[in-house]
Amino acid sequence: MELFSFLFFFPILALCLKIWKWVNDMGDQECYILDYQCYKPTDDRMVGTEFCGEVIKRNKNLGLNEYKFLLKAIVSSGIGEQTYAPRIMFSGREESPTLADGILEMEEFFHDSIGKLLSRAGVSAQEIDLLVVNVSMLSAVPCLSSRIINRYKMRDDVKCFNLTGMGCSASSISLDIIRNVFKSYKNKFALLVTSESLSPNWYAGNDRSMILANCLFRSCGCAILLTNNKSLKHRAMFKLKCLVRTHNGARDESYNCCIQIEDEKGRVGFHLGKNLPKAATRSFVDNLRVISPKILPVRELVKFMVVSLVKKMKHRGGKAVIDGIGLSLDLTEFDLEPARMTLHRFGNTSASSLWYVLAYMEAKKRLKKGEKVLMISFGAGFKCNSCVWEIVRDLGDGNVWKDEIEKYPPRTLVNPYMEKYGWIQDEDISTFKIPQD
């Protein structure tokens, strides 16, 4: 009888133990954001209308038509008067960058933001188990992650990843790496560092598809502290619910629409093709098709399918992309405000832009416990990555926006470029002669 009882209850006990282990392991696979720190460069790196005009005029390869094109692009970009540029621009050396210029731009960000983040979170650099750095357009030896490890004297067993060439969607890719490492290791701290180095990547030619990037991108960055330690979830700001990555690189038109190349004179630049909107739309729809069933109720799924059939993005770059996504998802001006204000105040900061948008929402006290935030990012390749965060507690602490959040949104986003440089529209073409090589 005792043997029978043992044989009967043993499988039940084993099943209970298996379920307990599964539940326990699932807890350790969770991914929380404890804190994040967006970088605000010093005021001596701030870019205004007059300075932008001086920089553009320094490019002797531009003719009148190129000036008109840039004027139109700047006026419609949605970028304001308080964005930041690398120091090389202020010394007038943008056409002759050095490796040191790119590293200096990154080190200023690293030393400011990582230090502030760790100090505020009460976590030492020696407690970091995983470091992921994404800076697409700067490759140095030792790599940037190694420079951070050396600067903060991290442990010799810290696991590090250094991503380059991943474009504006690199933050989500870094998150995916962290999420997957967290599945195999318990109670860990991860540091995600996301930025872009503009110093070595100024385009000095006159190809319109390549000079556009000079107008759109600005300096900034963000450091994010994450953990899978469930005992710290009461301190967390956000919990990762799901993450979906879509890559359309197998399609040649998608692959070539956003690419670093040389122009016919051998000058390196970043080409933004006319087919970029089509590639972005396709990648966007493919991504939403995967993530929508994970996050939307049936009623919203039906709405999404209808909307995606009748609406498409028709724009490229900065403000136009925000407009296109707003149209596709039937978003209100209130919904789009954080992205518009981030573009106006800080410009397109590549992979770190997402975090400035999130910080704006926090500063406006829009992030309430239990609500969810959908992040969507696009990147060269062509990629669309998205993730959903659940807000763990009410948020509204001071951040990179704290000194000026009351000024936003401003009454108008119209910048003064047209007022100051509109005379270009009436100039004679002989005024702007491109020198012959």
Image (cartoon, grey):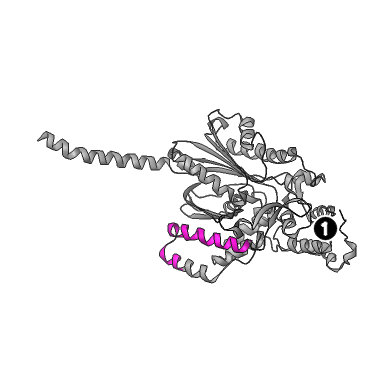
Indicate the position of residue 187 as horizontal and vertical percent values. 45, 36
Q: Within 10 Å of the Cα at label 1, are there few (<14), some (14-19), or many (20+) other Cα atoms? A: many
**Compared to 282, does 34 lie above or below?**
above
Asked if residue 297 lies in the magenta stretch, the reply is yes
Question: Residue placed farthest to the bottom in the image?
Answer: 310
The residue sitting at 48% across, 70% down in the picture is: 306
Start-end of magenta stretch: 276-302
Residue 171 showing in the rendered view = yes
**Compared to 100, does 74 lie above or below?**
below
**Compared to 77, does 180 lie above or below?**
above
Indicate the position of residue 101 as horizontal and vertical percent values. 75, 40
Left or right? Give the position of 244 relative to 53.
left
Seen from the viewer's position, the closer of residues 124 and 205 is 205
- Which quadrant would residue 300 be assigned to in this image? bottom left
Residue 416 showing in the rendered view = no
Seen from the viewer's position, the closer of residues 355 and 209 is 209
Which residue carries the number 1 mark? 62
